[in-house]
Image: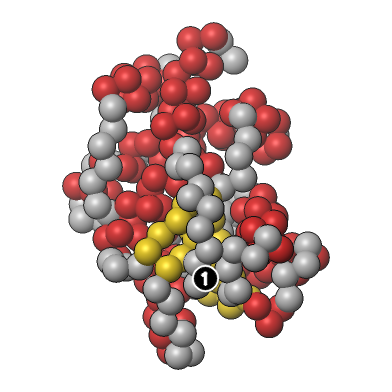
């Protein structure tokens, strides 16, 4: 990775980290995707007593269907169970295909089962935290939120995924989604500092644009 790309990627990586407040919550919502460490981090927090109930949410995307053929939520729950989360402490939401649906479908499923949480720990990929927070504020207002992700240095995260291009493209794509989705009404606005916007623009110019969406 060229040093200029590495510096700009680090700026975006640090911006997307949201410090885990460490508070206990009524539930956890583990967001599906390509990264099984979401399930592993959820299991770790459950064992620490941070929440009594876990919802894993996610169907499939084109980038996950081969890795998780039975659906993201199903595979995440299986991994969490291997790590000590009892099956009876998990709810599976298996239809969501985007972050907004993760939350709206989870809310509706819990309500149909008579579960009305007041607080939730949102567990996601490290670079998804700000977008997840902004989306939830839009579609589930009033829910007290704690964001959490397994902390890793950028280089270590790239190594764990095994695909530098994929990680950097998704990091750039999630950054753009903060303002595109806010403008479209899918999320509340998030303040993006000038240095983050500049780093994003340089990475797009360098060719990291495969995960961009049309405004």
Please give left or right for residue 91 compared with residue 179 in the image: right
The answer to whether residue 200 is left or right of residue 21 is: left
Tally the numbered discs. Answer: 1
Colouring scheme, one of rainbow, by chain, secondary structure, one colour: secondary structure
Depth order, front residue of 165/47? 47
Residue at disc 1, secondary structure:
strand
Position of 105 with respect to 72 (left or right) is left
Q: Is there any visible trace of residue 53 in the rendered image? A: yes
Query: What x and y, as percent, mark residue 46?
Result: 66, 64
The image shows residue 193, relative to residue 145, as above or below, that is above
| Residue linked to disc 1 | 27
Quarter of the image that includes the N terminus: top right
| Residue that protrudes farthest toward the right in the picture | 82
Q: Which of 165 and 112 lies nearest the eye of the viewer?
A: 112
Q: Nearer the viewer, residue 42 or 45?
A: 45
User: Could you say where residue 203 lies in the image, as x and y percent from the top left?
Assistant: 41, 21
The residue depicted at 45 percent of the width and 90 percent of the height is: 114
- Report the residue at 41% width, 82% height from top: 116
Q: Quadrant of residue 138?
A: bottom left
Q: Position of residue 178 (x, y in %)?
A: 31, 42
Residue 92 lies, with reference to residue 133, above or below; the image says below
Q: Position of residue 139 (x, y in %)?
A: 30, 65
The image shows residue 1, relative to residue 15, as above or below, that is above
Q: Is residue 56 visible?
A: no
| In this view, 130 is above or below 74 | above
Callout 1: few (<14), some (14-19), or many (20+) C-alpha neighbours within 10 Å?
Answer: many
Residue sticking out furthest to the front:
23
Residue in the image at 59% along x and 28% along y: 154
Q: Which quadrant: the C terminus?
A: top left
Q: Nearer the viewer, residue 99 or 42?
A: 42
The residue at the point 33 percent across, 56 percent down is 135
């Amino acid at each position: 990775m060229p040093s200029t790309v590495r510096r700009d990627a680090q700026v975006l990586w640090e911006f997307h980290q949201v410090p885990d407040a460490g508070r206990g919550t009524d539930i956890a919502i583990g967001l599906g995707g390509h990264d099984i460490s979401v399930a592993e981090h959820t299991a770790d927090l459950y064992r620490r007593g941070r929440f009594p109930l876990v919802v894993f949410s996610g169907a499939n995307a084109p980038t996950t269907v081969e890795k998780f053929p039975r659906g993201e939520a199903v595979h995440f729950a299986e991994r969490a169970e291997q790590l000590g989360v009892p099956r009876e402490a998990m709810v599976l939401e298996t239809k969501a295909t985007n972050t907004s649906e993760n939350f709206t479908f989870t809310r509706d499923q819990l309500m149909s089962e008579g579960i009305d949480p007041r607080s939730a720990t949102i567990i996601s990929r490290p670079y998804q935290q700000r977008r997840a927070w902004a989306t939830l504020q839009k579609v589930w207002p009033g829910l007290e939120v704690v964001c959490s992700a397994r902390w890793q240095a950028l280089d270590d995260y790239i190594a764990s995924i095994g695909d530098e291009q994929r990680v950097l493209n998704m990091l750039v794509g999630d950054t753009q989604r903060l303002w595109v989705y806010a403008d479209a009404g899918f999320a509340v606005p998030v303040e993006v500092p000038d240095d983050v916007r500049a780093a994003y623009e340089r990475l797009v110019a360098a060719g990291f644009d495969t995960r961009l969406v049309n405004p």
